[in-house]
Amino acid sequence: MADERETIVIIGAGIIGVSTAYFTAKKLAEKYPVDQRPRLILLEQCEPGCSASGKSGGFLARHWSDGTDTEKLAQFSYDLHAKLAAELGGADKWGYRAVDTFCAEIDRIPVMPAKQHKSSHFRTEAESVVTSIEVIAPRSRRSSPAATTMEYSLPTTPNEENMQPNSTHASIAVPEIESVKVVEPGTVPWLRTNVLTKLRQVGDTANTAQVDPLKLTRALLAEAKARGLEIVKAKVIDVAETGYRPPLIEFPVDNCARGKATIDEEFKVVGPSSSAPASTSLAGNSPVGTQGGWGKPMTNKPYILQLDQGSDIPADKIVVACGAWVTSCLRWEAFREVSASQIPIQGLRVHYLLAKPKYDLPAQAVFAEINGTVYSGEDAIEIYPRPDGSVFVCGEALDDPEMPPHNPFEPIYSKRATNRLKQIVNDVSPALSFDIIQYGLACHLPVHAKGIPVISKVPNTRGLYVAAGHGCWGILNGPATGLSVSELLVDDQPTSLDLSNFRLDRWY
């Protein structure tokens, strides 16, 4: 017998999908008795946190989005991180802690042989380098003396109505507030002072923090599972909509002999409302065991998720939260009204390594800008010592036109970029002339062309939602996004945040 309970399916077990699952499971447990509680299913084709959510630095900043469309989202989510850590033991479970944050300007590190790339029409890999602290983002439309940038150039943004997709990567704006100050080089004792030209403190323990994102993702997943979440390992092939029949064009075989027939007489468009023959059937895997019209399983639910293995899943509500792979939904029947221009999200390939330093480092995060290198422009890396004694280092992001691989576990790193990252790190810090724990690693950040994520119900649908495109701020904004989507799913409206800036149809 088919399950008559409401069924909610979340696609993608990264930080966005898992946060959505956690808060939804929590709200359902509070609202319904066990025997009446809707089913909550999380679909993942690989492993939880197998891409950017498990392979990023986990840096959190409360004030770095001030003056932008994501200001309220970032502030609320930063506070929510602290609340989750206090409630669930985040300091022990996922390394949550407040940190002091610095921007270090490093001068002329000989990271490569003295050989310049000749300019040509084609971009070389070195010329395609942007940094992992870079996102595609418009400048804030309001100016404030408390939200200027410190030598981080951002493109100007025209009025919202006239905005065009912007392919230029701009660095994250570090706010010019009173807490940003030049400090002595010895403040960060593990950096080489002979190459350090300037050191600024851009955050302190009141407004910046860190987590281990993979541990956070899996801890929230365990909490959701304890509240009734079902986890299914499978890939979504299609999301069919029950009752929908693609329009057909019927025309007579002997049309050439009709001579003067008009086009209206010659062709007949059969739309979704037309009835199909009872014998019509398409291949499909049905958990119900019977086929309805047009090859759809007989079910009273509006959607059917067709999977590459196991039984298909009838569902009432579906959340697509699969990061850099979110555009996969454009091929699914139920998402036929969603255009590629509404979710212009691509994967930005970022390299990273995990290392063990010579000695324990303090709770300090460093954004190091490397000036005067043999590359065009600047290189930058992020260095995050973690409470477990390891150091996470990322940078060398390559702006690739290629789509991410279907399997996030496939090797995607550039050997050249990885070696360059390692050499830069060794030159920046004597403490980081380390033993490599993991090396030759990369992931894809889901970057939206406007620099603003999509957190929205799909207009004119019965229960389709999209939550993706958070770029390098996915770990920071994951909990607030998950809470807001859970409110959409359970209460039909968000109550914690105004999501109008993140609606699917904002730009197109």
Image (cartoon, rainbow, N blue to C red):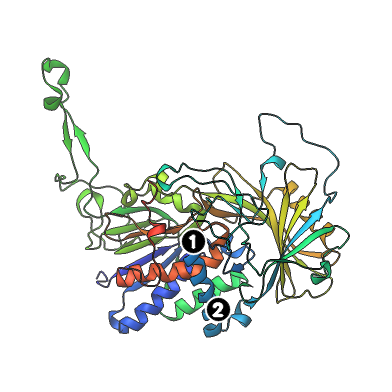
**Could you say where residue 163 lies in the image, as x and y percent from the top left?**
45, 43
**Could you say where residue 338 lies in the image, as x and y percent from the top left?**
35, 48
| Picture quadrant of residue 484 | bottom left
Amino acid type assigned to the residue bearing label 2 in the image: Ala
The label on residue 220 is none
Q: Which is more N-terminal, label 2 or label 1?
A: 1
Furthest-right residue in view? Answer: 194
- Mark 1–mark 2 Cα distance, whole angstroms, equals 19 Å
Q: Is residue 388 above or below residue 108?
A: below
Q: Which residue is mark 1?
A: 70
Q: Is residue 358 left or right of residue 461?
A: right
Q: Nearer the viewer, residue 133 or 331?
A: 133
Q: Nearer the viewer, mark 1 or mark 2?
A: 1
Of the 4 image quadrants, the one containing the C terminus is top left
| Picture quadrant of residue 316 | bottom left
> What residue is drawn where x is 13% and y is 16%?
257
The label on residue 82 is 2
Q: Is residue 154 above or below residue 368?
A: above
Q: Secondary structure at mark 2?
A: helix
**Could you say where residue 137 lies in the image, as x and y percent from the top left?**
54, 51
> What residue is drawn where x is 83% and y is 74%?
359
Q: Is residue 359 above or below residue 419?
A: below
Is any part of residue 384 visible from this angle?
Answer: no
